[in-house]
Amino acid sequence: MNLPGLGGNDIQKILLEEVLSIGSLEDDVLFQWVGVISDSTGHIYVTDNMDYSLKKFDDKGNLIKKTGRKGQGPGEFLAPRYLGISSELLYVTDQFKSGIQVFDKDLNYSHGISVSVPVYDLKVLEDDEIAVTTVSTAKAGMIFILNSKGKIKRELQYSDKKSRLLTDVVNFDLDSQGNLYLVYNYQDKIEKFDPEGIKIWSQKLLGIKDIKKEKIGQFVLPTKFVYKDIALDSSGNLFILGGSFSKNPSCDVYVLSPGGKHLTTFTLPDSSHCIYIDSNDFLYSRADEGVTLNKFKIKYVPE
């Protein structure tokens, strides 16, 4: 059992102790994993982009089941991405398919949730309340709360509707009180909103003023990540994965208190596209360009 996280202003340093590694360069358990999530029994669920699959592992890292293949039908994938979870169901996004696919925890396809555009990030609050962001020019800068049919229950406008394409793309997480935390992928901006959508604070960590852009086809788009992902521990501390502008690109993780104070920074042993923290404060990240999934015990060193 992992020790609980420390409160907001008590952390001086964070150390990682590897407790599990799934996949390696010597086997074909994983090819290029993208999304990871775990349940209350310790099972680990992973999307694998290169073999178009959803995989389930036990708490020792043994593969229990795999499902999926390339295609656009039910239970099929083009580019499986991120995962959400409730007490009974798994929710899977696809980079190149609109909507969300829903499976039971034995990886049997259950149903689809209609969303008109691909979902960028999601968090499942309950089976009839799913928070998503999308990449859409029509409704940019929005968090949508959907019901189980895909109908919008409520919306949160977090950025200017006039923002340039992709500059307001975010990853997000929510705490147990319903507060919303955002990290902007292409801006030096981290924000907290209360459950009513009122901004509580906005923070810059890296002093980056200009968004790096390139012309791609007919569009001028940002191309370098400032922040790549966000996860919360059980005490509500924010863990933010830095991107191209960090001292150790895609490895540095900035830890902030719920109030937005920068507490410490630590470095992952290998570059990662995302981080995930489970309910027992174990951190998961990538290694070997997606061939390996590492699980770490977070060790909190107090002041």
Image (spheres, rainbow, N blue to C red):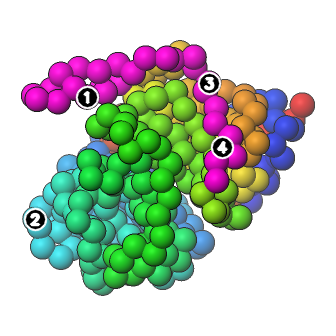
Mark 1 — residue? 221
The answer to which of marks 3 and 4 sits earlier in the sequence is 3
The answer to which of marks 4 and 1 sits earlier in the sequence is 1
Marks 3/4: CA–CA distance: 13 Å
Counting other residues with Cα less than 10 Å from the Cα at mark 3, is it few (<14), some (14-19), or many (20 or more)? Answer: few
**Figure check: 300 above or below 177:** above
| Secondary element at tag 3 | loop
Query: What residue is shown at x 55% (from left), y 27% (from top)?
Result: 252
The answer to which of marks 2 and 3 sits earlier in the sequence is 2
Mark 2 — residue? 71
Quadrant housing residue 103: bottom left
Counting other residues with Cα less than 10 Å from the Cα at mark 4, is it few (<14), some (14-19), or many (20 or more)? Answer: many
The N terminus lies in which quarter of the figure? Answer: bottom right
Label 2 sits on what residue type?
Gly
| Secondary element at tag 2 | loop
Quadrant housing residue 112: bottom left
Rendered location of residue 85, percent (x, y): 48, 70
For the residue pair 98 and 287, the one nearer the viewer reads as 98
Quadrant housing residue 147: bottom left
Label 3 sits on what residue type?
Leu
**Figure check: 138 above or below 107:** above
The answer, for residue 80, to whether it is visible in the render is: no
Counting other residues with Cα less than 10 Å from the Cα at mark 1, is it few (<14), some (14-19), or many (20 or more)? Answer: some
The C terminus lies in which quarter of the figure? Answer: top right
The residues colored magenta run: 198-224
| Secondary element at tag 4 | strand
Mark 4 — residue? 238
